[in-house]
Amino acid sequence: PTPSTARSRPEHIAPAAMINAIPKMTPCTALLYGKRPLQRIAVGAQKQQLEIPLDVVNDIPGKVDTSVSYVGNKYNALPWKDFIEIKLDARNLIEADVKSALTDLDWFGKVHALYAGKQVEAELAVAAKTIGAQKPMKYPVAKK
Protein backbone atom coordinates (compact mmCIF):
# COMPACT_ATOMS: atom_id res chain seq x y z
CA PRO A 1 0.00 0.00 0.00
CA THR A 2 1.06 3.55 -0.66
CA PRO A 3 1.65 5.92 2.26
CA SER A 4 -1.65 7.70 1.60
CA THR A 5 -3.64 4.44 1.86
CA ALA A 6 -1.87 3.46 5.06
CA ARG A 7 -3.16 6.66 6.68
CA SER A 8 -6.79 5.77 5.91
CA ARG A 9 -6.57 2.39 7.69
CA PRO A 10 -5.97 1.72 11.40
CA GLU A 11 -2.54 0.25 12.18
CA HIS A 12 -3.82 -3.03 13.69
CA ILE A 13 -5.78 -4.02 10.54
CA ALA A 14 -3.78 -5.96 7.98
CA PRO A 15 -3.93 -4.62 4.41
CA ALA A 16 -5.43 -7.86 3.09
CA ALA A 17 -8.16 -7.97 5.77
CA MET A 18 -10.38 -5.31 4.19
CA ILE A 19 -9.99 -3.04 1.21
CA ASN A 20 -11.78 0.28 1.46
CA ALA A 21 -11.83 0.86 -2.30
CA ILE A 22 -15.01 1.48 -4.23
CA PRO A 23 -15.40 1.73 -8.01
CA LYS A 24 -15.50 5.19 -9.53
CA MET A 25 -19.02 6.06 -10.52
CA THR A 26 -18.53 7.74 -13.85
CA PRO A 27 -19.72 6.66 -17.29
CA CYS A 28 -16.11 6.22 -18.47
CA THR A 29 -15.35 3.58 -15.79
CA ALA A 30 -18.77 1.98 -15.27
CA LEU A 31 -20.73 1.33 -18.46
CA LEU A 32 -24.02 0.70 -16.66
CA TYR A 33 -23.75 3.64 -14.21
CA GLY A 34 -27.12 5.33 -13.93
CA LYS A 35 -28.76 2.90 -16.37
CA ARG A 36 -30.66 0.81 -13.81
CA PRO A 37 -32.70 1.69 -10.71
CA LEU A 38 -31.16 -1.01 -8.50
CA GLN A 39 -27.66 -1.90 -7.40
CA ARG A 40 -27.26 -5.69 -7.08
CA ILE A 41 -24.59 -6.92 -4.69
CA ALA A 42 -23.42 -10.42 -3.71
CA VAL A 43 -22.88 -10.76 0.03
CA GLY A 44 -21.85 -13.39 2.53
CA ALA A 45 -20.30 -16.81 2.14
CA GLN A 46 -23.32 -18.03 0.17
CA LYS A 47 -23.06 -15.01 -2.18
CA GLN A 48 -26.66 -13.98 -1.60
CA GLN A 49 -27.94 -11.37 -4.03
CA LEU A 50 -29.32 -8.22 -2.42
CA GLU A 51 -30.92 -5.41 -4.38
CA ILE A 52 -30.42 -1.88 -3.11
CA PRO A 53 -32.05 1.18 -4.72
CA LEU A 54 -29.53 3.60 -6.23
CA ASP A 55 -31.07 6.46 -4.23
CA VAL A 56 -29.70 4.79 -1.09
CA VAL A 57 -26.12 4.53 -2.36
CA ASN A 58 -25.83 7.72 -4.45
CA ASP A 59 -24.09 9.66 -1.66
CA ILE A 60 -21.20 7.17 -1.36
CA PRO A 61 -19.19 8.36 -4.42
CA GLY A 62 -19.23 11.88 -2.97
CA LYS A 63 -17.39 10.70 0.16
CA VAL A 64 -14.38 9.13 -1.59
CA ASP A 65 -10.82 10.41 -1.36
CA THR A 66 -10.09 11.35 -4.97
CA SER A 67 -6.37 11.81 -4.30
CA VAL A 68 -5.95 8.01 -3.92
CA SER A 69 -6.83 5.59 -6.71
CA TYR A 70 -6.30 1.88 -7.28
CA VAL A 71 -6.27 -0.63 -10.17
CA GLY A 72 -5.73 1.47 -13.23
CA ASN A 73 -7.46 4.54 -11.80
CA LYS A 74 -10.84 2.72 -11.65
CA TYR A 75 -11.25 2.70 -7.84
CA ASN A 76 -11.08 5.38 -5.13
CA ALA A 77 -10.46 5.01 -1.42
CA LEU A 78 -13.35 5.60 0.95
CA PRO A 79 -12.47 7.13 4.34
CA TRP A 80 -12.14 4.33 6.89
CA LYS A 81 -14.91 5.63 9.19
CA ASP A 82 -17.46 5.74 6.35
CA PHE A 83 -16.29 2.35 5.06
CA ILE A 84 -16.80 0.69 8.47
CA GLU A 85 -20.25 2.29 8.87
CA ILE A 86 -21.30 0.88 5.49
CA LYS A 87 -19.90 -2.56 6.39
CA LEU A 88 -21.83 -2.57 9.69
CA ASP A 89 -25.05 -1.45 7.97
CA ALA A 90 -24.60 -4.19 5.36
CA ARG A 91 -24.00 -6.81 8.06
CA ASN A 92 -27.13 -5.73 9.94
CA LEU A 93 -29.14 -5.80 6.71
CA ILE A 94 -27.89 -9.31 5.89
CA GLU A 95 -28.70 -10.56 9.40
CA ALA A 96 -32.17 -9.03 9.26
CA ASP A 97 -32.78 -10.61 5.85
CA VAL A 98 -31.57 -14.05 6.99
CA LYS A 99 -33.49 -14.00 10.29
CA SER A 100 -36.68 -12.72 8.69
CA ALA A 101 -39.48 -15.00 7.58
CA LEU A 102 -39.88 -12.70 4.58
CA THR A 103 -36.71 -13.61 2.69
CA ASP A 104 -36.49 -13.47 -1.11
CA LEU A 105 -39.07 -10.71 -1.38
CA ASP A 106 -38.52 -7.66 -3.53
CA TRP A 107 -39.86 -5.12 -1.06
CA PHE A 108 -37.89 -2.03 -2.06
CA GLY A 109 -39.90 -1.65 -5.26
CA LYS A 110 -43.21 -2.19 -3.49
CA VAL A 111 -42.42 0.34 -0.78
CA HIS A 112 -41.24 2.85 -3.38
CA ALA A 113 -44.41 2.35 -5.46
CA LEU A 114 -46.60 2.75 -2.37
CA TYR A 115 -44.75 5.90 -1.31
CA ALA A 116 -44.92 7.38 -4.82
CA GLY A 117 -48.66 6.64 -5.01
CA LYS A 118 -49.33 8.27 -1.63
CA GLN A 119 -47.22 11.27 -2.64
CA VAL A 120 -49.27 11.79 -5.82
CA GLU A 121 -52.52 11.42 -3.83
CA ALA A 122 -51.33 14.06 -1.36
CA GLU A 123 -50.30 16.44 -4.17
CA LEU A 124 -53.69 16.04 -5.87
CA ALA A 125 -55.53 16.63 -2.59
CA VAL A 126 -53.54 19.81 -1.92
CA ALA A 127 -54.10 21.02 -5.49
CA ALA A 128 -57.84 20.36 -5.22
CA LYS A 129 -58.06 22.28 -1.94
CA THR A 130 -56.02 25.27 -3.11
CA ILE A 131 -56.81 25.65 -6.80
CA GLY A 132 -60.23 23.99 -6.81
CA ALA A 133 -61.45 26.02 -3.81
CA GLN A 134 -60.88 29.33 -5.57
CA LYS A 135 -63.89 30.85 -7.23
CA PRO A 136 -63.46 31.62 -10.90
CA MET A 137 -62.51 35.23 -11.41
CA LYS A 138 -64.75 37.26 -13.69
CA TYR A 139 -63.26 40.05 -15.71
CA PRO A 140 -65.43 43.11 -16.36
CA VAL A 141 -66.10 43.40 -20.06
CA ALA A 142 -67.91 46.35 -21.56
CA LYS A 143 -70.94 45.36 -23.60
CA LYS A 144 -71.20 46.79 -27.10
Image (cartoon, rainbow, N blue to C red):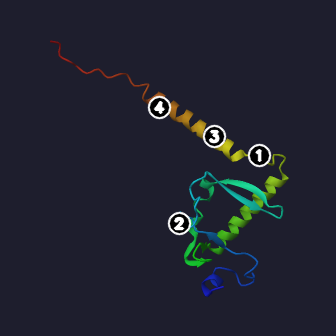
Q: Quadrant of residue 6?
A: bottom right
Position of residue 125 measured from the top left corner of the image (x, y, whole percent):
52, 30
Q: Residue at x 44, y 25 (%)?
A: 132
Label 3: element kind = helix
Read off the residue under disc 2: 28
Q: Is 143 placed left or right of 46 in the picture?
A: left
Q: What's the residue type where badge 2 is placed?
A: Cys
* Identity of the residue drawn at 54% across and 64% down: 26
| Sequence-wise first label, 4 or 1 | 1
Task: Kindly state the secondary structure of the residue where label 2 is placed.
Answer: loop
Q: Position of residue 48 (x, y in %)?
A: 79, 58
Of residues 60 and 138, the one nearer the viewer is 60
Point out the frontmost of discs 4 and 1.
1
Q: Is disc 4 in contact with disc 2, using a CB cutoff of under 8 Å? A: no
Amino acid identity at mark 3: Ala
Q: Is residue 114 above or below residue 91?
A: above
Residue located at (62% from left, 74% from top): 79
Q: Nearer the viewer, mark 2 or mark 3?
A: 2
Q: Which residue is mark 1?
A: 105
Say whether marks 3 and 1 touch (CB < 8 Å).
no
**Label placed on residue 127:** 4
